Amino acid sequence: MLSTIQSMFIDNLLLYQKLDMKKIFSNKELLLFHLFHDITKVFPQNIIIVKDIMFFFLDNENYFEAKLKLPYLRKKFQHRRIVLVREEVVLVNLIFGFFPDPYIHSIRIDRNTRTRQIIIIVGFLSYEERGIAVGSNGDYIKAVNEIFDTQIKFAEYQKFPVRIKCEVVKM
């Protein structure tokens, strides 16, 4: 059995893992890439479409400039959800990037020993903030988990299953 200190050390190592993200552009993503640039004057680093959600990954220095055009982008793509994410190479920073609007109170790690799955639990202070993070019918958190399943690899270690889960923190 691991001691609490060892467990905290391992959790911190996991949260600060370096990531590699697949960058594969189909014709649809290339078209969106150019359209995004025409509107924002910013080149996205990556575009990932999951169902009706379009994730545009941006450099930190261009994020706020592009965010000014977010209302116009959402108006232009009325039937799709547009999400701007700061492209990060460290796991914990990327998790914060996926949830820019609600306040994240805590992040903790849980493990499913049967499936060897790592569960990263993102804690929010209210059900309203959790609802924003999860999305309608859980669509947003499902999309984030699909990105982790298909697009993100850990740079140093073999792929192991990671799930993001949102919950309200009990005070």
Image (tube, helix red, strand yellow):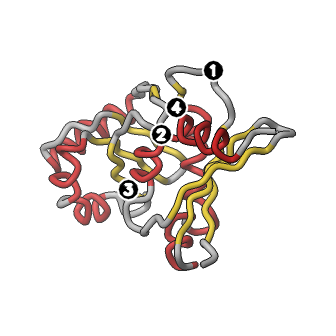
- Badge nearest the viewer, 2 or 3: 2
Residue located beneath label 2 in the image: 91
In the rendered image, the vertical position of residue 73 relative to residue 2, given as above or below: below
Q: Nearer the viewer, mark 4 or mark 2?
A: 2
Identify the residue under disc 4.
152
Gap in Å between the C-alphas at discs 4 and 1? 11 Å
Q: Is residue 1 left or right of residue 63?
A: right
Lower position in the chain sequence, tag 4 or tag 1: 4
Mark 2 and mark 3: Cα distance apart in space: 22 Å
Q: Could you tell me how far apart the alpha carbons at marks 3 and 1 are, in whole angstroms?
A: 31 Å
Label 2 amino acid?
Leu
Q: Earlier in the sequence, mark 3 or mark 4?
A: 3
* Viewer-nearest of discs 4 and 1: 1
How crowded pointer 2 is (Cα within 10 Å; few <14, some 14-19, many 20+) is rated as some
Quadrant for the N terminus, please: top right
Residue 65 percent across, percent down from the top left: 15, 53
Which residue does the numbered mark 1 point to in the structure image?
158
Circle 2: element type: helix
